[in-house]
Amino acid sequence: MSPPSTPRRPFAPLTRWLDALLDPKRQELTVIWTLLAYMAVWTAYRIIATWPRDLHADETELYGWSRHLALGTDKHPPFSAWVARAWFTLVPPSDLSVHLLATANISLTLYIAWRTMRRYMDAEKSLFGLALLTLIPFFNFIALKYNANAVLLPLWALTIHCFLRALESRAAMWAALAGMFAGASMLGKYWSIVLVVALGLAALIDPRRGRLFASPAPWLMILCGGLVLGPHIWWLADHGFPTFAYAAAHESADLADNLRDTLTYLPGAVAYAAVALITAAVVLRPSRAALADIAWPAESERRTILLIQLLLLVAPMPVALVTGIRIVPLWAMPAYTLLPVVLLASPLIAVGREAVRRGLIVASAVSLGSLALSPVVALVIHLSDPPGPFEYASLLADHVDREWRRHSDEAVPLVAGETVLAENTAFYLRTDTLGFETADLAVLKQRAAARGAVLVCPAEDKGCIATAEQIIAGQPQILRGKVWLSRPLFGQPGGRVSDVFFLVLPSGASAK
């Protein structure tokens, strides 16, 4: 008679992973390793899915700013450039290091969000909440492009975490940190005024406001935030507020457009979280009483958190209607780290081990499924989306570098031209960049004459070529060229772009 068979444990690796995540002694380290694995998966996705094309212009723009740090730029406040400088000091610039910067930024945000969740919820709810956040594309697909929007993810998460701790304890350290991170958020993007307003209103409405404002905490927040932001404000005044002019250029065209943009903003912002909301509803099946407690929590602490979450989403709308500023749902990217606490912290919501297991399965399926489909995504992009000239800038940079080194032993000192193409080409040449649209052309001509430069234009951009001809007029050593660039993928030919380049050779170089 054969011995009775031992019951098989359902998918042992998942069970061991879940055991470690729920073990108080191993939980912290396991969450960190999980987020590092998440970072690796989405880095691999980004590499493969974008294989046919070069880096996005937002990313190469940050590299250009990071080469010459300042207290501001013509487009955005400077924090994202500062982060890029720190990162590229540690990691040599390349496509891979740019992708790693983006995924590290995401994983850091998720870790901060998890730590915030653990202050209000048990391990099961916090892990389920972390899984829900990975179903919001702001924490993967969209933030894989590191730019002035993505930099806000950890900054808002840190500001919210420190603010809530300062509200609870009125401790000077947490108040100072909240103010510093709020100031840093404003240095990331002025959209962060939404965060400052939301937290300020929450502090005024919270029942603990009497004790809060009787303590040094709120004044420390204001002081520390002002100290962080002050140098940039001085820079703005000294340079004529160029970032304000850039923002004003993105206002709605008229009242009808402003009304449409504003009214579609909130549905669009909520739609980004739709998969997470649906997953929570399907897995947890909350009762009507639980839903009522989520909509209007019984505890004042949870009501404050709900208020902050709502204000982060709706506060921009009346401002946009009054000022005419055009707002888009994408800007809600950093506003969702409190959503799991809003959805799950109610004592009427039960999240057991099985719910966590299902949440992890769904989250893992999305990440690993996306990675598995990344070659298909790459091929679809390759075959259906005609490339822009800047998307083959690495090929142009290789060609320009070969031509330049035939005549000079010095590295290319500057790339100028159509802004996006110049920025991308400069990244792959690891050199400085200037766009014709923002450059002082007389100064640019002098700089090119003194040290040399490369000017690049899309072949069909007659205005750019005319500007380049104006800059090279009278220069003694000029080489002109035109290239047709294409890149195959999986044996399939890709679209072709044509670029024009002008080499202004440095003195002493031979123009063969």
Image (cartoon, rainbow, N blue to C red):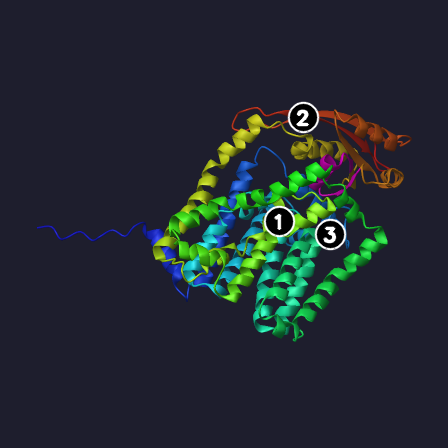
Q: Is residue 401 above or below residue 229?
A: above
**Foreground residue, 247 or 48?**
247
User: Quick one: SS at disc 1?
Assistant: loop
Q: Is residue 202 above or below residue 409?
A: below
Q: Is residue 431 magenta?
A: yes
Q: Is residue 295 magenta?
A: no
Give the amino acid at mark 3. Answer: Pro
Residue in view at x 89 percent, y 32 percent: 475
Q: Residues within 10 Å of mark 3 (few under 14, many from 20)?
A: many
Report, in whole angstroms, how far the alpha carbon at label 2 lies from the one at label 1.
Answer: 30 Å
Q: Residues within 10 Å of mark 1 (few under 14, many from 20)?
A: many
Mark 2 — residue? 497
User: Quick one: SS at disc 3?
Assistant: loop
Residue in view at x 32 percent, y 49 percent: 11
Q: Quadrant of residue 287?
A: bottom left
Give the amino acid at mark 1. Answer: Ala
The earlier-in-sequence mark between 3 and 1 is: 3
Mark sitting on residue 77:
3
Q: Is residue 270 above or below residue 33?
A: above
Mark sitting on residue 41:
none
Q: Residues within 10 Å of mark 2 (few under 14, many from 20)?
A: many
Residue mark closest to the camera, 2 vs 1: 1
Residue mark closest to the camera, 2 vs 3: 3
**Foreground residue, 454 or 338?**
338
Report, in whole angstroms, how far the alpha carbon at label 3 lies from the one at label 1.
Answer: 14 Å
Mark 1 — residue? 150
